[in-house]
Image (cartoon, rainbow, N blue to C red):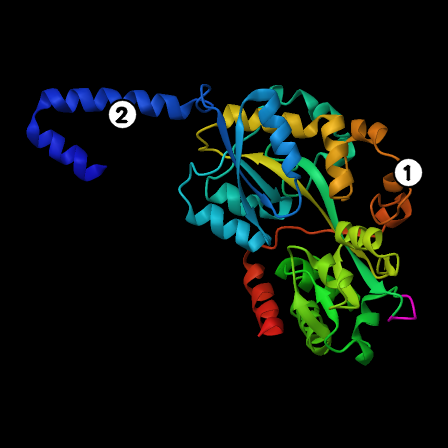
C-alpha cells in the first residue's frame, strides 16, 4: 500500500487527494465497531467446543454466516492470532491467563457490555479473574477442568491421585491433554505445589514428575482424547472433564474422578477482537451463545462446566447430577485457577518439550 501511495504522489496532487479521501473514509469505517452491513463474522475457537448447530442456528436467525478457525491448544491460538493480520478475527475464544499477551499485542478490545444483554446470565462469582479484574476483556463461555479417567474393564483399582498415573502397569497406555501450561501446572500440584508456583523448586519437581510419567504416556491429544479411551487405544487419561464425561456416556466401563491434590480449572472466555471487520456481528454472536436455551444445548453436546445461570433450567439430571459434567461445590473448593506467568512461560514450554521429545 505504501508503494502505491508513493506512485500516486508522483502522478499528481489531484489523484493523491482522491486516494487520501478514500483512505480517510476507510480508516473512519475501521475505527467504528465494524461493518454493520456485513453478513459474516469470523471466530477462532477450540475444536469440539461449539456445536455446528449453534452456528447454523445463529445464521438462520440473523442471516450472518460464521466462519470458524479451530485450534487444539492455547499455544496454537496465540500463534494463529499473532501471526495473522490483526483484522482476521472478530471473536476470539481464549483463556484468562492469555489476556496479557493478547492485550500486549493489541488484539482484544474492551467490551461494550451494552451490546451483550445476555451477560446478565453470568453470575458475579464467575465474571472476574486475576488477569481481568474489572471484567473488561472476556465473558465466560465454559469452565474447563481436568479429571482422571480409566477403563474399569482394564484398570481394576479406581484412580484418585495424579501419583496413581505413575503406576508401571500403565506403560504406554495414558492419553493426556496437549497443553504445556496445564500439564506442567498439574505436575506441580502432583508434587504438592501450587499450579502457579514458578519457583525453581516447584518447576524442578514438576519436571521430575513428568519424566517419571513419560514412559506411561501413549499420546498427547487436545482435540478428542476421549476417542482413544472409547476405542481402547488407551486405558487411562488425564484429560478435560467434558471429554471424560463423553467417554463415560459412550462406554459405561469408563470411570472418572478428580485428583485429590487439586483440580486444574479455568474459564474459556469470549473476547472481541480490537481490529475485527465485523465487530457488531461479533457482539451478536456472543449474545446468541449466552442465551440460556442456546447455552444449555451447547452443554448437551460438550458437557463442560456451564456458568450460565439461565441455562440450568433447560438441562436435565443427566447433566445436573453428573459430578464430572457439573462440578459440585465440594470439588470446586479444591480448584486452582491458572495465572499469567509472564516470562516463566518459557521455562514451562521447555519442560513440556522435554516431556514430548
The crowd level at tag 2 (other Cα within 10 Å; few <14, some 14-19, many 20+) is few
63 lies left or right of 331: left
* Mark carried by residue 123: none
Q: What SS does tag 1 mark? A: helix
Check disc 2 and report its element: helix, strand or loop.
helix
Question: Can residue 184 be seen at all in this image of the molecule?
Answer: yes
Q: Front-most of 52 and 167?
A: 52
Q: Main secondary structure of the magenta part?
A: loop
Q: Position of residue 244 (x, y in %)?
A: 79, 55
Label 1 neighbour load within 10 Å: few <14, some 14-19, many 20+: few
Residue picked out by circle 1: 317
Where does residue 307 sit, x and y in percent of width and height?
77, 36
Q: Is residue 193 visible?
A: no
What residue is shown at x 63% (from left), y 38% (from top)?
52
Q: Compared to 80, does 211 lie above or below?
A: below
Q: Give me the residue at 50% from left, 33% from top.
A: 90
Percent coordinates x, y for residue 214 in the rendering: 69, 75
Q: Which mark is residue 23?
A: 2
Relative to residue 196, is residue 169 drawn left or right?
right
Which contiguous range is marked in magenta? 154-158
Amino acid at each position: 500500500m505504501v508503494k502505491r501511495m508513493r506512485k500516486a504522489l508522483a502522478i499528481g496532487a489531484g489523484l493523491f487527494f482522491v486516494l487520501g479521501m478514500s483512505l480517510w473514509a476507510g480508516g473512519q469505517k475501521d475505527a467504528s465497531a465494524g461493518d454493520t452491513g456485513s453478513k459474516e463474522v469470523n471466530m477462532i475457537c477450540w475444536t469440539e467446543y461449539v456445536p455446528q448447530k449453534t452456528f447454523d442456528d445463529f445464521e438462520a436467525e440473523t442471516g450472518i454466516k460464521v466462519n470458524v478457525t479451530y485450534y487444539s491448544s492455547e499455544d496454537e491460538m496465540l500463534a494463529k492470532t499473532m501471526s495473522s493480520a490483526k483484522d482476521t478475527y472478530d471473536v476470539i475464544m481464549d483463556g484468562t491467563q492469555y489476556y496479557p499477551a493478547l492485550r500486549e499485542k493489541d488484539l482484544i478490545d474492551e467490551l461494550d457490555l451494552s451490546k451483550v444483554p445476555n451477560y446478565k446470565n453470568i453470575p458475579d462469582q464467575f465474571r472476574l479473574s486475576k488477569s481481568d479484574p474489572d471484567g473488561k476483556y472476556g465473558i465466560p463461555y465454559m469452565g474447563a477442568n481436568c479429571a482422571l479417567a480409566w477403563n474399569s474393564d482394564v484398570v481394576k483399582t479406581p484412580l484418585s491421585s495424579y501419583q496413581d498415573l505413575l503406576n508401571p502397569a500403565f506403560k504406554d497406555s495414558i492419553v493426556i491433554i496437549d497443553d504445556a501450561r496445564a500439564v506442567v501446572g498439574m505436575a506441580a500440584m502432583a508434587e504438592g505445589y501450587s499450579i502457579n508456583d514458578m519457583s525453581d523448586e516447584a518447576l524442578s519437581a514438576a519436571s521430575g514428575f513428568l519424566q517419571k510419567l513419560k514412559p506411561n504416556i501413549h499420546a498427547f491429544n487436545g482435540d478428542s482424547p476421549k476417542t482413544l479411551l472409547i476405542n481402547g487405544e488407551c486405558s487411562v487419561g488425564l484429560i478435560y472433564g467434558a471429554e471424560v464425561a463423553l467417554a463415560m456416556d459412550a462406554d459405561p466401563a469408563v470411570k472418572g474422578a478428580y485428583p485429590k491434590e487439586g483440580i486444574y480449572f479455568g474459564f474459556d472466555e469470549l473476547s472481541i477482537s480490537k481490529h475485527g471487520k465485523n465487530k457488531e456481528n461479533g457482539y451478536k454472536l456472543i449474545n446468541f451463545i449466552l442465551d440460556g436455551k442456546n447455552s444449555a444445548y451447547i452443554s448437551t453436546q460438550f458437557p463442560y462446566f456451564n456458568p450460565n445461570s439461565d441455562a440450568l433450567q433447560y438441562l436435565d439430571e443427566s447433566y445436573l447430577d453428573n459430578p464430572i459434567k457439573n462440578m459440585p461445590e465440594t470439588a470446586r473448593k479444591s480448584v486452582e485457577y491458572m495465572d499469567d506467568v509472564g516470562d516463566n512461560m518459557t521455562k514451562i514450554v521447555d519442560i513440556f518439550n522435554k516431556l514430548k521429545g
